[in-house]
Image (cartoon, rainbow, N blue to C red):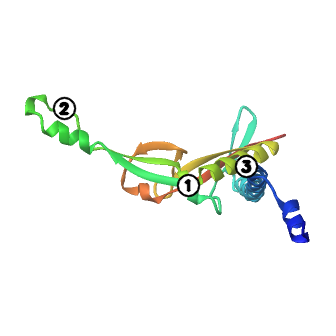
Amino acid sequence: MTDFQEELRRNLRSPETVAKEKEDEEIARQYKNAEFELSQIKQALIESAKNAQYTVENGVTKVYCLYKPLGESHYLRMNITDNMEQLVQDRKRLAIFRDPDLVHQSWRHFEVDPRWSDEYRLFSAALKELAAKENIFVEFVVYNRNTQQVYPFPSTVDEHYSMSSCELRIKASTVVAD
């Protein structure tokens, strides 16, 4: 056997080994991303404390913030559905059989973009795990910049004109120990 053939034989790896290494690399990358975002969230919580953005209930001080992640906005996918088909079918009926309460309505769906679902799952799990070690509760939400409303992520909400200004945010809170 030639040296080249021997080297090839030594470097043969199974597809499972390569796949496992890639998965481990992706997990490590998402933990690194989560560590960075958590450091930014901690700074945002400190700023919230400085700006009196906290609540005191039953003697417990809870500091909170709404943080815009730097690189994770691609996880959010929005689409719109409506009841137009139902309206069309209703209008085909005789007037006495039509639904008088049926009006056009549309909904905005906020969900994880399927292209990034694995990455989102890894990143959010890593962020939640690291945050829990610091006694910080984090959750992903949808924030409407125009109305300053916060919606769960993923969710479905009534559509209105300002919904196009929605973005993915991280809602974080922690309890201050006395």
What is the three-letter code of the residue carrying label 3?
Leu
The foreground one among 121 and 106 is 121
- How many marks overall? 3
Residue 43 lies in what quarter of the image? bottom right
Q: Are marks 2 and 3 in contact (CB under 8 Å)?
A: no
Give left or right: position of 153 versus 82: right
Q: What is the x, y in percent for residue 13? A: 81, 56
Query: How far is mark 2 from mark 1, CA to CA?
Result: 40 Å
Q: Amino acid at mark 2?
A: Asp
For marks 2 and 1, the one nearer the N-term is 2
Q: Is residue 104 left or right of residue 63?
A: left
Whole-percent x, y for residue 27 in the image: 75, 52
Residue depicted at 46% across the width and 58% down the height: 146
The residue closer to the viewer here, 131 or 46, is 131
Helix, strand or loop status at disc 2: loop
* Residue 175, quarter of the rendered image: top right
User: Measured from the top left, where is residue 121 in percent x and y?
Assistant: 65, 47
Q: In the picture shown, does residue 141 fall above or below 93?
A: below
Distance of mark 3 from mark 1, alpha carbons?
Answer: 20 Å
| Kind of residue at disc 1 | Arg
> Is residue 7 visible to us here?
yes
Q: Which mark is residue 127?
A: 3
In this figure, which residue is indicated by the disc labeled 1? 115
Mark 3: secondary structure: helix
Question: Which mark sits nearer the N-terminus, 2 or 3?
Answer: 2
Q: Residue at x 19, y 38 (%)?
A: 89
The residue identified by callout 2 is 99
Crowd class of label 1 (few under 14; some 14 to 19; many from 20; radius 10 Å):
few
* Quadrant into which the C terminus falls: top right
| Viewport quadrant of the N terminus | bottom right
Q: Secondary structure at mark 1?
A: helix
Disc number for residue 1: none
